[in-house]
Image (cartoon, helix red, strand yellow):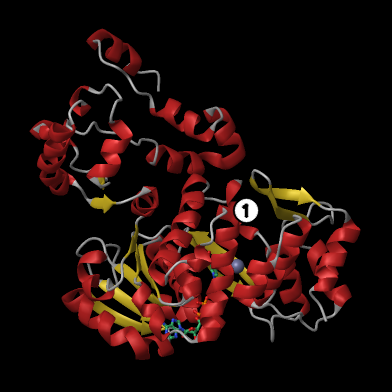
Amino acid sequence: MGAGKTTVARMLGLPAVDSDDLVEAAAGKPIAEIFRDEGEVAFRLQEEQAIVLALGGGAVTSPRVREELGDALTIWLDVDVDTCWERVRGSGRPLAQDEGEFRRLFEERRKLYAEVADVVAHDVHDVVLAVAGIHVERGALPRLRELVPGDGQVALLSDPHVAGIHGMDAQLALGPRLAETHELPPGEEAKTLAAVDRLWQELRLDRSGTIVALGGGCTTDAAGFAAATYLRGIAWTPIPTSLVAQVDAAIGGKTAIDLPQGKNLVGAFHWPARTVVDPALLETLPEPQRLEGMAEVVKAGLLAGEPFWELPDDELVRRSIAYKAAICLRDPLERGERTLLNLGHTFAHALEAAAGYEGLTHGRAVALGLLAALRLSGRDTVVVEEVLRPEPVRVDRDRAWAAMKRDKKARGGEPRFVLLGDDGPVSGVAVPEEDARRELDRLIK
Ligand SMILES: NC(=O)c1ccc[n+]([C@@H]2O[C@H](COP(=O)([O-])OP(=O)(O)OC[C@H]3O[C@@H](n4cnc5c(N)ncnc54)[C@H](O)[C@@H]3O)[C@@H](O)[C@H]2O)c1
Ligand SMILES: [Zn+2]
């Protein structure tokens, strides 16, 4: 600070780019406000991600530029030549005057792009995934050894059920990097202090090691929390195997365990070194578990305004992940925009609490919550009815209403909602009490 960097640039006659300006432009507010509202950690995260350098198409023909790209995450946005030509023809750009010449140049440069690129992206969603460190590929599991960053030792964690189905493939794929395997208890039992304590004591990895979590959201939440805390934090790579984990739990860096007082009450933000998503793993997932994940897919699609649920599996997974990941990159610590991901969840949490977290799964509760959120938004509910087939639940109405008024996002006992507006989703919306209560009642039989 105050050393004279800008003066140096002026003396050299070179353009100066100030990373503070970039962060301010991206956040839409001054640094002082980012510090005040979000804290220094959030500012540093934004600073790390501050720069997208849009390199001209010919820049990499210079060996010096190629060398400088060394440590930067270099993404080749590989779009087909016809599309590019359509976009630039008649634009007056010097190298886009003649179609034949343009195509020749395109072909010639592709080799260089392939050489410098760390990641090949075909659209903006691929770019988001690359920046978030998420690798989505059918058949990725067998290539695990190279996909887990670094070359250090790996501890493989999974629940007994998933270990029995995919554990051997993962072990074979990790090969000599595999130093330890650990079993976490099935389901929410993994997300207890007792399970994490046992794991902390069993782990032998040093700080250069990586925890690899193969399993559903319970496994990735507990393993991620262990990675965030063991030796004050080591690298981890989730390999989500359920639809819930692929599109939701393993995305965004939230890790947690439960307390008797409530779910996810102890945890940490700990972004994975990489997330490896192989949609082929979903083929062994039972239908009810798939429906659990579809609730979050429909939620993401409604928020994005695109029918993700109609896409074939690989694309459904890729688009749902990219939607959530982009929001989490913009708001890593959930200070603002990320709360949109709670669409339908205020109702869902109230129903789950009223059911005493028994006999009503989160996905079923979210399906019902989405119905209520759509109705309060004045929207049609047919998509939710057809894709998620929600059934009203038998719980105590007063208990559900009391839980809703206690919700984390309630202000002064007034529940707030995420609703869909004409220009996209909005959070923190106050709704007249009688309307909220009426919609909650409609979900209960
Ligand atoms: N961290 C976050 O941001 C976040 C977001 C959403 C949910 N979550 C958490 O995720 C958890 C729920 O995740 P879940 O539904 O995946 O639960 P889970 O981990 O218990 O998995 C559900 C069941 O599916 C089985 N399974 C998983 N993959 C399989 C496969 N490929 N083939 C066959 N069976 C398979 C598991 O063994 C388990 O029996 C909750 O604890 C929730 O709080 C966290
Ligand atoms: Zn949810």
The image shows residue 265 at horizontal and vertical percentages of 62, 67
Front-most of residues 350 and 229: 350
Image quarter in which the C terminus is found: bottom right
The image shows residue 224 at horizontal and vertical percentages of 44, 68
Q: Is residue 149 left or right of residue 315?
A: left
Q: Residue furthest right?
A: 434
The image shows residue 297 at horizontal and vertical percentages of 54, 66
| Mark 1 C-beta to ligand 2 under 8 Å | no
SS assignment at label 1:
helix
Q: Is residue 168 left or right of residue 295?
A: left
| Circle count | 1
From what the image shows, is residue 256 above or below residue 341? below
Q: Which residue in the protein does label 1 denote?
A: 340
- The structure residue drawn at horizontal position 22% and vertical position 77%, both measured from the top left corner, is 173
Q: State which image quarter holds ligand 2.
A: bottom right
Q: Is residue 141 something one can see in this rendering?
A: yes
Image quarter in which the N terminus is found: top left
Q: Is residue 262 something one can see in this rendering?
A: no
Front-most of residues 266 and 170: 170
Mark 1 neighbour density, 10 Å: few (under 14) some (14–19) many (20 or more): many
- The structure residue drawn at horizontal position 38% and vertical position 68%, both measured from the top left corner, is 314
- The structure residue drawn at horizontal position 51% and vertical position 39%, both measured from the top left corner, is 40
Q: Is residue 407 left or right of residue 325?
A: right
Query: Can you tell which quarter of the image residue 52 is in?
Result: top left
The image shows residue 155 at horizontal and vertical percentages of 31, 75
- The structure residue drawn at horizontal position 45% and vertical position 84%, both measured from the top left corner, is 285
Q: Is residue 267 left or right of residue 6?
A: right
Q: Amino acid at mark 1?
A: Leu
